[in-house]
Amino acid sequence: MYFSVGETKDGKHSWWLYGGNHEMVAWAGQRFGSLSDAKRAAQAFKAGAATARYDVYLDEGNKYRWRAWRSSDKVAASGESFDSKYNAERAAKNVEANAGSATGL
């Protein structure tokens, strides 16, 4: 896995986490006002991914997604939607187990 931090289409900034197949597996779930803020958020998620609380939910399109929380703050969201709760849970566990050793920061 590897992190990427950069500019969004609207000129804000965010971070993304990619798997070994170069597909996005997670993102910040929000945009930041500066590149340095986005990078700090990515570093914080990387450091705390293994201890974050993950939940799986059904989105408006009836697809499953996951999100990660630290206290009451959402710190990451799934990079894609899933057809089953099981697959969303597996993806969240993969991020939980591997984001801490991801490169790119």
Image: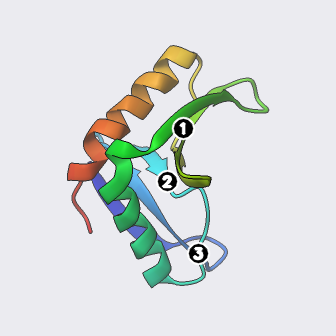
Amino acid beneath label 2: Trp
Amino acid beneath label 3: Phe
Q: Which mark is residue 80?
A: 1
Instruction: Give whichever of 100, 70 is nearer the camera.
Output: 70
Drawn side of residue 52 relative to residue 103, left or right: right
Residue 18 at least partly seen: no
Residue receiving disc 3: 32
Label 2 to label 3, Cα distance in Å? 12 Å
Q: Quadrant of the C terminus?
A: bottom left
Residue 61 image point, x, y percent: 76, 29
Drawn side of residue 4 relative to residue 62, left or right: left
Residue 6 image point, x, y percent: 45, 73
Drawn side of residue 83 relative to residue 17, left or right: right
State which quadrant residue 51 falls in. Answer: top left
Q: Earlier in the sequence, mark 1 or mark 2?
A: 2
Residue 68 at least partly seen: yes
Label 1 to label 3, Cα distance in Å? 20 Å
State which quadrant residue 91 falls in. Answer: top left
Residue receiving disc 2: 27
* Mark 2 Cα shell of 10 Å, populated few (<14), some (14-19), many (≥20): many
Q: Residue at x 55, y 52 (%)?
A: 71
